[in-house]
Image: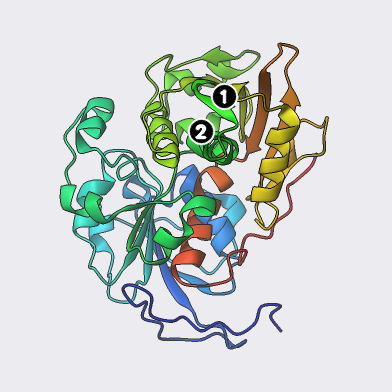
Amino acid sequence: MSDFPEVVITKVGRPVRVLETSGSGLSKVRVAILGASGYSGADLVRLLALHPVARIVALTGERQAGKTMAEVFPHLGGLDLPRLTKIDEVDWTPVDVAFCALPHGTTQDVVKAIPTHVKIIDISADFRLTDIDSYAEWYGHPHRAVELQKEAVYGLTEHKRDSIHNARIVANPGCYPTSAQLPLIPLLQAGLIDPDEIIIDAKSGVTGAGREAKQDSLFAEVSEGVHAYGIARHRHAPEIDQELSQAVGRDIKVVFTPHLMPMNRGILSTIYVKLANGHTAADLRDVLEKRYADEPFVRVTPDGTAPSTRHVRGSNMALMGVFADRVPGRAILVSAIDNLVKGASGQAIQNMNVMLQLPEKMGLSQIALFP
């Protein structure tokens, strides 16, 4: 017997067509995963396999078409999954929700061809930037789905639920922006920190670069070292600027530098802020604890305890710590997420749950794997 109550999916925005139920009485939502042969796609399969409502009916992988998921990812063997196909072979008639885990720059063309009855959650960056000129500047080509961009909703779940609820297209946030925005947005909205004095020093596991073979991701290039990349030009910078600016109603530009770490999963963002109007680090902690007290996937660590990527590995949790700097008037925030879960596939499923009015924790209750 399922631990979840019977779920009734009501018509919010465009209706989701539910045609079958499981033995436990739960309504089934039929899911397609585009780009299932990548790391985010594989994590979507891993998580959705335990989701009591979702049933995966289509999986795509252009170079792996015709193979089973067990051939591409042996850890997913034994699951009842369809074979990988090419995107143009997908029958969209029975699909309710599509997760797009495709390379940046390809989703815009693909989404234009998906029927409007399908709700879309895009894990790429193709719909995150609302300004199409900014998108062209940072991604090197014109936006190819301008009309769809107008209806896309940014999917930082804890701060965008009302918009996500009624959306057909949700732009899942980037992993770095998720780790930075969760601690910063409440503090900016409360006026506790100086918007012009934000430095984000972030570090990522190698899976953030995707599964495609690249020189910079080779073992010998990554192992036993750490290096900064995308200095002053990383594509997540305008995404962070956009959402922080929207949160406070004026332009903000942060200093953001990402680093590649010799680990598979995780994002750790160390954020340096200047306190405003005589506030203290204790005030920051108080605001964050109150803002996220009822959030299932965001937690402030105990005073003096710094979060680590190993504390969130494999889970949809975001942990954040607050510390007074030794420099008067400044504070340090530390934020940790799993880049493939809360930074990608887990947050995407969280957004699906919100879109369909399902319990938000459904399918996402995995506790972090430690050690």
Q: Is residue 353 above or below residue 318?
A: below
Q: Which residue is nearer to you in this view: 221 or 319?
A: 319
Q: Position of residue 258 (x, y in %)?
A: 51, 21
Secondary structure under the numbered disc 1 in the rendered image: strand
Q: Is residue 153 above or below residue 233?
A: below
Asked whether, in this view, residue 125 is left or right of residue 328, the answer is left
Secondary structure under the numbered disc 2 in the rendered image: helix
Amino acid type at image mark 1: Ala
The label on residue 176 is 2
Q: Quadrant of residue 193?
A: top right
Q: Residues within 10 Å of mark 1 (few under 14, many from 20)?
A: many
Amino acid type at image mark 2: Tyr
Q: Position of residue 268 (x, y in %)?
A: 63, 29
Asked whether, in this view, residue 251 is left or right of residue 271, the answer is left
Q: Position of residue 355 (x, y in %)?
A: 44, 66
Identify residue for label 1: 202
